[in-house]
């Protein structure tokens, strides 16, 4: 398995990986997802040329990192790939004060807890999410 920081993914790779793990909301506008990925820090796991997993996040590179996605193809899950992606990502951002993850996936919640992350209700943190709004002219 090759772990590499990359700057972008192809639309085909996005559709294959995100579709395989059921994150179809990213596929409503795959080109927009590709632009978002290109503006993120992206660490991939590849089996040869095949994209089998990734972790991506955004950071100010000093105080905070937000992990947006941690995905591994179903056929490659439970082989330590997600753990290795998280470990290398954590090492890359070791200078940051904290890493924040928001997930509604029970399996990922258990995964992050096992990796030493503290649930928000135990860290005195409250998460707020503003749903997407269409841009409206102010005049």
Image: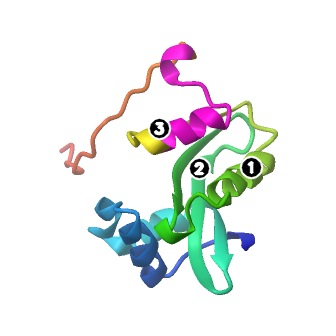
- Residue 6 lies, in percent from the top left, at 67, 71
Q: Residues within 10 Å of mark 2 (few under 14, many from 20)?
A: some
Which residue is more in the foreground, 42 or 137? 42
Q: Nearer the viewer, mark 1 or mark 2?
A: 1
Dot 3 alpha-carbon crowd within 10 angstroms: few under 14, some 14 to 19, many 20 or more: some
- Tag of residue 87: 1
Does label 3 or label 1 sit earlier along the sequence?
1
User: Which stretch is magenta?
Assistant: 108-122
Residue at point 38% right, 39% down? 104
Residues marked 3 and 1 touching at CB (< 8 Å): no
Residue 1 within the segment the image draws in magenta: no
Image coordinates of residue 82 in percent, x first then y, are: 62, 56
Q: Which mark is residue 58?
A: 2
- How many angstroms separate mark 3 from mark 1 (CA)? 18 Å
How many other residues sit within 10 Å of disc 1, few (<14), some (14-19) or many (≥20)?
A: few
Residue under label 3 = 102
Indicate whether residue 114 is drawn in magenta: yes
């Amino acid at each position: 398995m090759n772990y590499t920081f990359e700057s972008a993914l192809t639309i085909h790779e996005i559709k294959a990986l995100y579709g395989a793990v059921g994150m179809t909301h990213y596929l409503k506008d795959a080109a927009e997802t590709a632009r978002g990925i290109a503006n993120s820090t992206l660490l991939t796991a590849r089996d040869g040329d095949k994209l089998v997993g990734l972790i991506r996040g955004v950071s100010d590179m000093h105080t905070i990192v937000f992990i947006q996605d941690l995905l591994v193809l179903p056929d490659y899950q439970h082989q330590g790939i997600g753990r290795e992606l998280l470990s290398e990502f954590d090492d890359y951002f070791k200078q940051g004060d904290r890493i924040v993850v928001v997930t509604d996936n029970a399996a990922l919640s258990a995964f992050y807890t096992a990796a030493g992350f503290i649930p928000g209700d135990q860290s005195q943190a409250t998460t707020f999410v503003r749903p997407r709004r269409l841009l409206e002219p102010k005049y």
